[in-house]
Image (spheres, helix red, strand yellow):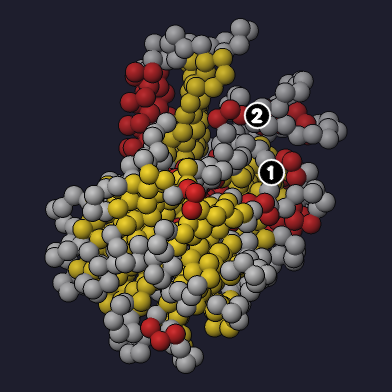
Amino acid sequence: MADKIPVTVLTGYLGAGKTTLLNRILSEQHGKKYAVIVNEFGEIGIDNDLVVGADEEVFEMNNGCICCTVRGDLIRIIENLMKRRGKFDAIIVETTGLADPAPVAQTFFVDQDVQEKSRLDAVVTVADAKWLSQRLKDAPEAKNQIAFADVILLNKTDLVSPAELAAVEARIRGINPYATLHKTQKCAIELDKVLNRGAFDLDRILEIEPAFLEQDDHDHHHHDHECGPGCTHEHHHHHHGGLKHFHDEEIQSVAVSHEGDIDPEKFMPWINDLVQAEGPNILRSKGILAFVKEPKRFVFQGVHMILDGDLQRDWKKEEKRVSRIVFIGRNLKPDALREGFLACAA
Amino acid sequence: MNAAPAQTLTDRVTSLAFDEHVLHAGFLGEEAVFVMAEGAIQIGREMPAFRPHGDSILVVASDGKRIVTGGDDGKIVETRVDGSTTVLGDEKGRWIDAVALGPDGAVAWSTGRKAVTREGKGKMRELALPSTSQGLAFAPKGFRLAIAHIDGASLWFPNTDAAPEVYGWKGPHLDITFSPDNRFLVTSMQENQLHGWKLADKGHMRMSGYPGKTRSFSWSHDGLWLATSGAQAAIVWPFAKDGPTGKAPRECGVRPAKVTKVAFHPKSLVLAIGYEDGWVILVRFTDGAELLVRAGGDGTPITALGWDGPGKRLVFGSESGSSGLLALPV
């Protein structure tokens, strides 16, 4: 079986700069060809790539789960694109500013044919530094897009003061502390920070620490490199002072860790029941678990009710067997999540 | 591994290589025709391949006299056996999602949330749809188009102003077909099942149990059987009398690989079956006898199968372009 084609989902509220990023991706000299699935023709000025207009058609799967929605048009387009595989290296799906990223993401886990040929790489959200704070108050879609993101481009930083920038960053972190965040002007960014991230790849879930602990550091140095989870270079956590804590009333993240092993016989039914019951509220989930008598790490990630998990690499000798799970969602019940998870301890 | 069928026709197969995904394999008159996803149409062996849409063909329909293709250029093109072409429609760069052939040179296509019919003389009608559609079929009698969409199918008489009649069933419907006797309408669905309606009373029929989506179906020449892909055998539903409700389907050509294409012989109860691992076999329906046509080739899924009019030759194509022509012993 040939390699699966990576698919990057590009979201962002109206006017945040999605098209700017898309044009940048398509016009830079990188020797790669992209198939781009857009919602509005004509905004993209590049001829040599494959640009497809989509209908953003969301439907519910008839599998009894109300949040299990997929993009029907996307299934058809990807099936068709896969019949001319030699013509491009990767796919980018641009969603409208008002779109919920979940149906797009779920399409890659629910449809068997799509899953066989392609893999979701990451959800990249472009946010407008000047207007995001306002949008987070009045547009639930904007908040969803931040909560769902693996990579966030906080764009148009030149239009705000340093204090305003810190405030908007704190708001983002209040919703989603795990995404890799890059501050940009005119979406200027090296493309390898946006593309081919492997955010849904179980083998690349190395750690799930809040990303800002590492990143904050870099605001004070002149690094050419911003780090996210999984970055292996040497860090010096001297100052974490810059970021105000901000708590979003609606969407937040809950992380629970247990210094020791988890009983899979307890955990599996618990997590399955949890996503069945709370799936509509849980936007994203991730976990790295030490199962009893299991030398390998069990990793999982999920989107609403859909979970994908597997045994990954061995726990290293110097590595503590710590089991950790993270949820990002709406109106989560932190105490219940904590108690539920800790009750799965071996 | 599984045993090959005892009898083989492999020495009667001429191999052909196209190096591209084969979207359609069939015949125009006497000539074998292959249509590639990357845009080329090959008619017979003498004529050079040509590209009526440029880079890509998305959908194909053929009745043995003409081939109609829809491309990512938004055009709908009719091709005849001499290689001559006519542009029947132009949707200005929008992908064409489905095409179907009707009586007297009629054609239908869908793009976005609309369906269009074009009669042989050029008269066009357009219908707004509740969702996009990737399944269109003309009824065997009269000028009537069935359109599969989310939550059911619409049956439309393009020459009347009446609203289309809706046959409802929740969920996304993909491909659609009428039984040749015009009594049943069948769709394949996103959820690995088929749905059927009796046209007379809109009675429902559910045909489920597939491990994968059904993306190929074929009616037997007598109209009594519907063969389908999507399982590790061709699943063939009985449509005599009241249809398949309460009856078990026949399973033909059971193998450890999923069936990707089915094509009934045009004159006898023989079914050609293509598999995801590149195998092609013929199954004689009356006694279950199997004949090997191709033992896998390069192992890529069979994507196209087609008989000629008299049923003497069968062509097949695959995802990688490795293809072939079987000439049956006369």
For the question of whether residue A129 can be seen, the reply is no
For the residues bearing labels 1 and 2, Cβ distance under 8 angstroms: no
**x, y percent for residue A123:** 59, 45
Three-letter amino acid code at disc 1? Leu
Q: What is the C-alpha distance between the residues marked 1 and 2?
A: 15 Å
Q: Residues within 10 Å of mark 2 (few under 14, many from 20)?
A: many
User: In the rendered image, which quarter contains the N terminus of chain B?
Assistant: top left
The answer to which image quadrant residue B188 occupies is bottom left
Mark 1: secondary structure: loop
**Left or right of B2, for residue A207:** right
* Residue A229: mark: 2
Task: Identify which residue is drawn at 59% across, 62% down.
Answer: B36
The answer to which image quadrant residue B225 occupies is bottom left
Task: Identify which residue is drawn at 65% across, 34% down.
Answer: A244
User: Disc 1 marks which residue?
Assistant: A195
**Left or right of A163, for residue A113:** left
**x, y percent for residue A345:** 40, 14
